[in-house]
Image (cartoon, helix red, strand yellow):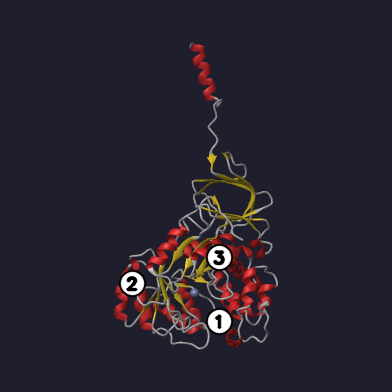
Amino acid sequence: MKRLGVLMMILLGFGCRPEPATEYDLIISNVNLIDGTGSPLKEVISVGIKEGKIKALAKALKGKSNTYLNGSGKYLIPGLFDCHIHTIDYQKDFPKFMHYGVTSVFITGGSLCTDAYYAEMREHGEQDSIPAPRVFHTSQHFSMEGRHPSKTYPSNQWRDGESIFYLKDTLQIEGLVQRVAQHPNTGIKLTIEDGPHPPFVERMPFEFVEKTVKEAEKYDLEVFAHVSDNEELAMAIRAGVQNLVHFTGVDLNPNNSIQVQLLSEFRKRDPSWVTTLMIDKSFWYPLYPDWFESKSLLPEYQAMRKRVTEKSKWFATAYLNMYKESYGLTEDHLPVLMTPQVQDIQFLYDKGFNMVLGTDTGNDFNFHGYSLHEEMQLLEMGGMQPLDILKMWTLNAAKMLAVDHELGSIEVGKLADMVLLDKNPLEAIENTLAITTVIKNGKIQQRIH
Ligand SMILES: [Zn+2]
């Protein structure tokens, strides 16, 4: 008996009964990993996912699972964020985001966006058995009667006190911010701008902007502002705004000492700035449908062609002329048109601004899910590197939304939102469209197209 006891001890001590292998819900094996942090690609990595989270990343993963995805020759990137969207039919639009790998969206107001509508969309986004992205959103627009966006985008759905707040005097702002703070808004949407194109409306007076920022600070809420030119940019910075949800219309000049001083003041606030190059491209569609359709087989584009009218062509011409004049351009060629904006974005990126991608989808010729890929192609066209673009699309977006502790990159401990690609996006950014699988919360998502 004594000898048997010793034998048992030896057997146990020398590992004859090894630890059971870790059970994962999903393993993606031997994939090329682009983790979204800006680090270079890592080859032949296996990813172990359990209970919706990334539990292990290793060259040789010890563990087993009932579900395997063979990642050989494929590329894994984090789930993507579109940080400026609108929808008036989320049940139709949410599956499109998921189809194109967009696992999180930031909704920046809209004519239907009452507290109840936002709550419905958030609830949808919390599911992982139906194709719906995670939903983050601002408050309703803080605007004024007869201004942007209710005058420039008229609809009888804009309802003061429900889907939009018309500021009548600065005293009213205290109560409105208090109301907004009771709901899970990421911040306050403040529309300073005088409209994106002619005919312009009046812009919001400075004291309204300043008071909103001051009241928001009491509740630790950040302000997400619309600006559409340099004057409004200066107003936003002087008033203490923390985030800008558009880039278009702003023209930076590194030789302008006043502007450089303003930007360095802004930088100290660690602001986020959303690109929305798709605004310009979509506004020009009625004049140049080929810019869209030459590469894309998206059926929606064909349907959109029927919506081009004389009025939309007039508007496109007015906008294009204004744009060319402001940048001193003479040629109607998409890369030429995009370059000045992308150079400004690159300048800010290099200065350490948290640059983030958004599309302002919900406007005509700007498609839910798909157009975020176009946004990236425009950045690449203007000279940015794919690795930087991918970071703007993922980790920077999560940082702006204050969820970078759990989303935005493929790192152990984070939620498993990721996209598997057939082609390498670092070789050409359009390869982000070569999607084979979309994963949200560790679950493989249904794709609709
Ligand atoms: Zn918008």
Q: Which mark is residue 165?
A: none
Residue at numbered disc 3:
392
Residue at numbered disc 2:
177
Along the line of sight, the residue nearer the viewer: 197 or 299: 299
Inspect this view and state whether residue 358 appears: yes
Tag 2 secondary structure: helix
Inspect this view and state whether residue 382 appears: no
Q: Residues within 10 Å of mark 2 (few under 14, many from 20)?
A: many
CB under 8 Å between discs 1 and 2: no
Q: Is residue 343 left or right of residue 267?
A: right
Confirm if mark 2 falls within 8 A of ligand 1.
no
Q: CA distance from mark 3 to mark 1?
A: 22 Å
Q: Is residue 130 left or right of residue 296?
A: left
Up the image or down, 190 lies above or below 391; here it is below
Q: Residues within 10 Å of mark 1 (few under 14, many from 20)?
A: few
Tag 3 secondary structure: helix
Can you give x and y, in whole percent of width and height, for residue 323 in the image?
A: 59, 84
Q: CA distance from mark 3 to mark 2?
A: 29 Å
Up the image or down, 367 lies above or below 14; here it is below
In which image quadrant can residue 242 be found? bottom left
CB under 8 Å between discs 3 and 2: no
Question: Label 1 sits on what residue type?
Answer: Asn
Residue at numbered disc 1:
253
Question: Label 2 sits on what residue type?
Answer: Val
Question: Label 3 sits on what residue type?
Answer: Met
Which of the two discs, 3 and 1, labels the residue nearer the N terminus? 1
Can you give x and y, in whole percent of width and height, for residue 290 in the image?
A: 69, 76
